Amino acid sequence: RPTFATEVLQDLGDGRLACLQQFAEDESAKKSEHWTECPFRPLVCEHKGCTRTVSYLHLKEHDQQCQFKIIPCPNGCDYECVRGVMSAHLEGSCVCKPIPCPYRRLGKCNTVPQNKLEAHLLTHCNHHIEGLVSYIDTLTLRGQKIEQRIYDANDRLSRFKDQQFQKHLKDLGKMQKKISHMESDLTSTQNKQMKQLSKVL
């Protein structure tokens, strides 16, 4: 894990650990003047609670990410807090946080700011009613299609049963004919055997 000192040096500028500008011993004035303009000069973050030291070159980048910078709520409410705890505000007490519209399933809207929900419901009442009517029409049409599919399925099932019944009747008729022939053959065979037996006796 890098030490704090290493982290500070790494922040001093794009992989360079320090300014490469060099001055002679008698050029202290130039050195001081350069130091006030050098993009690699270290600066302490101005936001209370932050202890980071970054180069002037990266100060803007750090400022956009600093967890201790006080920022306004992005939802537009009057609340301000440090960036590090803003997410808790957005998920919790923010009066402007987006919440689902109760009628979002009707397709007219999705989310509205929490503090504007009541006004939204009043001003968009007609839209919600139109959406509700459209939704009912859609359900009615869907129900009619389902009823038709059920009717068609029952009709096919009924015709299939009739076909199967007729087929079974034919099969049964064929079976009865076979049984009749077998009974006739059996009777004929028995009569022949009886005649032969009577001759023997």
Image: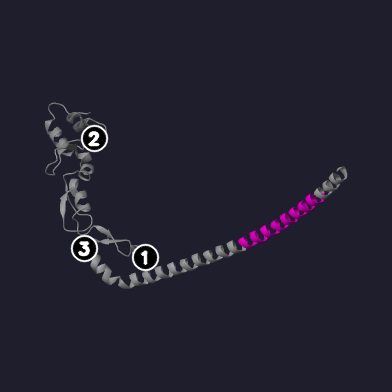
Callout 1–callout 3 Cβ contact below 8 Å = no
Compare residues 145 and 53 and report the one nearer the observer. 145
Occupied quadrant, residue 66: top left
Amino acid on which disc 2 is placed: Gly
In the structure shown, which secondary structural element does the residue marked by tag 2 occupy? Answer: loop
Residue occupied by mark 3: 115
In the structure shown, which secondary structural element does the residue marked by tag 1 occupy? Answer: helix
Closer to the observer: label 2 or label 1? 1
Residue occupied by mark 2: 13
Amino acid on which disc 1 is placed: Leu
The residues tagged by marks 2 and 1 sit, at their Cα atoms, a distance apart of 54 Å
Horizontal side of residue 178 vs 8, given as left or right: right
Horizontal side of residue 129 vs 160, given as left or right: left
Residue stretch rendered in magenta on the structure: 160-188
- The structure residue drawn at horizontal position 52% and vertical position 64%, both measured from the top left corner, is 150
Q: Earlier in the sequence, mark 2 or mark 1?
A: 2
In the structure shown, which secondary structural element does the residue marked by tag 3 occupy? Answer: helix
Residue occupied by mark 1: 106
Seen as rendered, the residue at the extreme front is 201
Horizontal side of residue 177 vs 163, given as left or right: right
Q: Earlier in the sequence, mark 1 or mark 3?
A: 1
Amino acid on which disc 3 is placed: Asn
Q: Is residue 116 magenta?
A: no
Question: Which quadrant does the N terminus fall into?
Answer: top left
Question: Which quadrant does the C terminus fall into?
Answer: top right
Q: Main secondary structure of the magenta part?
A: helix
The residues tagged by marks 1 and 3 sit, at their Cα atoms, a distance apart of 22 Å
